[in-house]
DNA sequence: ATGGTCGTGTGACGA
């Protein structure tokens, strides 16, 4: 059995202490981070290694984006795709000793206007998802897990108000179509919703909301998927809402799942 | 309809 977590950390250097706290309190075997906002060589690894996280694969760039997989178990880096050729550090993949491949993804946010003719970033987001779809259609992943900040809340109960968010980037029908096309192409199963099929689930609350907890205007942007061949081994999914209230916290909280593999 | 808050790195830009 191993436990895995995904967390958009919004600067791994500013929040090194919060990563250490999560590793100490929850001790996942693998932690996937997004928005590290750091070149790989400047990621502060020492404190993570001191807790047993001796292995890391990462893609980084100065100031923006960046993904990293921290692990107690050895990792073999197997890919780092630049979907849509944006030149961004948004994907890295690694294989665990048991053969399971973990994809860590940070899908572009897509800007504010949900129209690619008015907003180039929205088009890039859709193109990014289309290239992900094509990649998984061609590679037919098996014994694989995909996690990350996918920047889309696909279900009505993944947002605080479905009707109000239908024209808001992250919950528009065209984004959900693209999201579902990626899932279908790789035969991915939504592990979080397999474990917690009913009720509202959020993993992100905006910094701009004056009282995130009482207002609770959240969205489920962070996901854990597994290919169908191993999805039945997944269990114990959790979204760690209290982490949003940690001092100088990220706007995202960690999402956990365990696998009997 | 608008503005609200962060992080990076010092002026906007991205989220």
Image (cartoon, coloured by chain):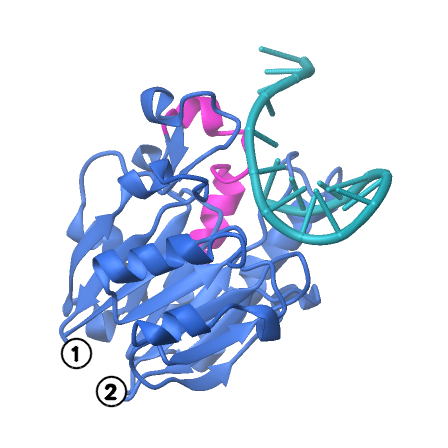
Image quadrant in which you'd find residue A168 = top right
Few, some or many C-alpha atoms within 10 Å of disc 1 (few <14, some 14-19, many ≥20)? few
The percent position of residue A30, horizontal first and vertical second, equals 31, 70
Residue located beneath label 1 in the image: A261
Q: Can you tell which chain is drawn blue?
A: A
Tell me the quadrant of the picture where the C terminus of chain A can be found. bottom left
Q: Can you tell which chain is drawn cyan?
A: B
Image quadrant in which you'd find residue B15 = top right
Which of the two labelled residues, at mark 1 and mark 2, occupies the earlier sequence position? 2
Is A86 contained in the magenta span? no
The residue at 58%/73% (across/down) is A40
Which region shows up in magenta?
A: A160-181
The percent position of residue A251, horizontal first and vertical second, equals 45, 40
Tell which of A230 and A61 is nearer to you.
Answer: A61
Residue located beneath label 2 in the image: A98
Whether residue A151 is visible: yes
């Amino acid at each position: 059995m191993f436990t895995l977590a995904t967390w958009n950390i919004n600067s791994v250097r500013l929040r090194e202490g919060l990563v250490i706290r999560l590793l100490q309190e929850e001790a996942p075997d693998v932690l996937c981070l997004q928005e590290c906002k750091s070149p790989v060589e400047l990621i502060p690894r020492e404190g993570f290694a001191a807790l047993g996280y001796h292995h890391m694969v990462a893609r980084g760039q100065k100031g923006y984006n960046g993904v990293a997989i921290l692990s107690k178990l050895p990792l073999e880096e197997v890919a780092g795709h630049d979907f849509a050729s944006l030149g961004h550090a948004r994907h890295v993949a690694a294989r665990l000793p048991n053969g399971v491949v973990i994809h860590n993804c940070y899908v572009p946010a897509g800007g504010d206007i949900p129209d690619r003719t008015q907003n180039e970033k929205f088009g890039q987001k859709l193109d990014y998802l289309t290239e992900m779809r094509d990649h998984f259609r061609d590679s037919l992943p098996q014994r694989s897990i995909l996690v990350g900040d996918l920047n889309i809340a696909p279900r009505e109960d993944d947002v605080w108000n479905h009707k109000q968010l239908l024209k808001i980037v992250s919950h528009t029908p065209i984004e959900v179509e693209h999201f579902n096309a990626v899932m279908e192409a790789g035969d991915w199963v939504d592990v979080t919703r397999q474990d917690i099929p009913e009720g509202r689930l959020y993993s992100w609350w905006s910094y701009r909301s004056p009282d995130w907890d009482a207002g609770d205007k959240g969205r489920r942007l962070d996901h854990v998927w597994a290919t169908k061949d191993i999805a039945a081994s997944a269990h114990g999914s959790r979204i760690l809402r209290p982490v949003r209230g940690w001092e100088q916290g990220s706007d995202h909280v960690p999402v956990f799942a365990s696998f009997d593999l």
